[in-house]
Image: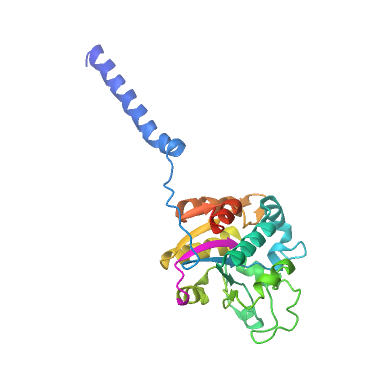
Amino acid sequence: MTMENLNNSRRALALAVAVAATVLVAPRAEAQLPDPGMEVDTSRTAIVITDPQNDFLSPDGVTWGVVGESVTENNTVENIGRLIATAKAQGYQVFVSPHYYYPTDHGWHFGGALEVLMHNIGMFDRKGALSLDGFEGSGADWLDQYKPHLEDGETVITSPHKVYGPESNDLSLQLRKRGIDKVILAGMSANLCVESHMRELLEDGFEVAVVGDATAAAKLPDLDGYAAAMANFRFMANALWDTDTTVALLEGR
């Protein structure tokens, strides 16, 4: 091979490497995901809140030691309250998908890491499916500031979900029976029940917008559940809004 041919080959190789590097790097740095958006109206859109319960959102809750930082940073308690209050004022239906464990659920023979932890710490425990004994003020109960809206006789409280998603409860049935096909989703916790509800609702044919600062998640030294969820919300949800944006949309602004 002549020196000229060798130099040409080297230039061609350098060019190929540069092109490959551009193809690999540029999309990560510059490409933007589409923003499908979601229109809202009172006849077809509902607010769905997962697990607005003391064990997640109260400083006295059993998970506060790991979720409290994220809840505080995001102003989650207040933002969920704003969503519920605005929805009620503007005529939107509100649904709650709660998480309860009954004594019989502690007879399960296996579970994932967080399932086992929740059972071990008594999270969302109730005395029984047919009893409210000891429920008031417990970890399974709503935050006090939410009660006037959630207990107004109009809010739809679904049967409980048992792991993370709504596959085991009647949320989709309740939504469809009321002509709802668009969901504004918030609640706890971001990378567990909120994300699982988003995934199942999308698979079930609903449009889903997630309110990113009306949720929160556990933070551990090497794990950030909120960051993980936000990445997946961006990839999958029809829209990812903050509370201010959502309130303005609900109010028609």
Task: Tell me if 76 is positioned left or right of 158 in this view.
Answer: right
Residue under the image location 52 percent in, 50 percent down? 231
Q: Residue at x 42, y 39 (%)?
A: 31
Q: Which residues are magenta?
A: 177-187
Residue lying at the far bottom of the rendered structure = 130
Q: Position of residue 3 (x, y in %)?
A: 25, 12
Q: Residue furthest top?
A: 3
> x and y percent of residue 6 in the render?
26, 17
- Residue 58 seen anywhere in this rendered image of the structure: yes
Q: Is residue 188 visible?
A: no
> Looking at this view, is 217 or 91 the one in front?
91
* Residue 150 quadrant: bottom right
Residue 178 is inside the magenta segment: yes
Q: Residue 101, image x and y in percent?
A: 64, 77
Give the total number of marks visible in the rendering.
Answer: 0
Q: Vertical placement of 60 versus 15: above or below? A: below
Q: Give the residue drawn at x 23%, y 16%.
A: 5
Rendered image coloring scheme: rainbow
Q: Of 214 and 10, which appears nearest the observer?
A: 214
Vertical relation: 160 (above or below) 45: below
- Report the front residue among 139 and 145: 145
Quarter of the figure that contains the N terminus = top left
Q: Is residue 30 left or right of residue 129?
A: left
